Image (tube, rainbow, N blue to C red):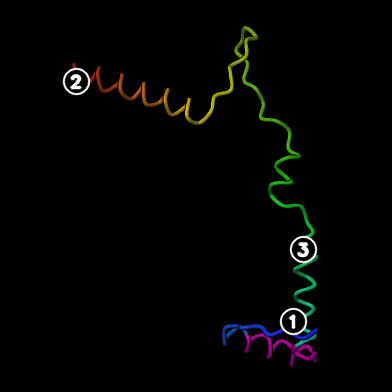
Amino acid sequence: MRTTLDLPDETFRQLKAQAALRGFKLKELVAQFIERGLADSAAPSRDELSRSRPPIPIARKADGSVTPALSNAQLYAILNEEDLAQLDRTND
């Protein structure tokens, strides 16, 4: 199948040089690179990999009680409260 590609001049020069060095036609080299890229993209994506990871471990206190999992918003709220309390103590 024929197609047209707009490539930066430097990329085209590098492709042409690589094709000549390897003894390929330009279209053969480009087809090889595309095939390799497609084969690499068949690997699992980051999203797929993150879904297969085990859950984050839950922290337990010495008495065996579980520390609840907090969202980022909840963590920021706690940190902001601590910062405000620290400012109040230094202003007194």
Q: Which residue is drawn at the image coordinates 79% and 78% (left, top)? A: 32
Of tags 2 and 3, the one toward the viewer is 3
Lower sequence index among marks 1 and 3: 1
Tell me where residue 12 sits by quadrant. bottom right
Residue behind mark 1:
30
- Asked which secondary structure carries label 1, the reply is helix
First to last magenta residue range: 12-26
Residue at (75, 76) in percent of width and height: 33
Marks 1, 2: nearer the viewer: 1
The answer for how far apart the CA atoms under marks 1 and 2 are is: 68 Å
Give the image quarter of residue 16: bottom right
> Seen in the image, is 5 located left or right of residue 42?
left
Give the left or right position of residue 17, taking residue 86 as reference: right
- Identify the residue at horizontal 67%, vertical 26% (top origin): 57
| Residue highlighted by disc 2 | 91
Quarter of the image containing the C terminus?
A: top left
For the residues labelled 1 and 3, the Cα–Cα distance comes to 15 Å
Residue 56 x/y as whole percent: 66, 30
How crowded pointer 3 is (Cα within 10 Å; few <14, some 14-19, many 20+) is rated as few
Using the image, determine if residue 22 lies above or below residue 63: below
Q: Which residue is mark 3?
A: 40
Amino acid at circle 3: Asp
Q: Residue 17: give its label.
A: none
Residue 74 is inside the magenta segment: no
Which residue extends farthest left? 92
Q: How dense is the environment of label 2, judged by Cα within 10 Å: few (below 14), some, or many (20 and up)?
A: few
Residue 27 placed where, x, y %? 77, 87
Q: Amino acid at mark 2?
A: Asn
Q: CA distance from mark 2 to mark 3?
A: 59 Å
Residue 6 x/y as whole percent: 61, 83
51 horizontally vs 72: left or right = right
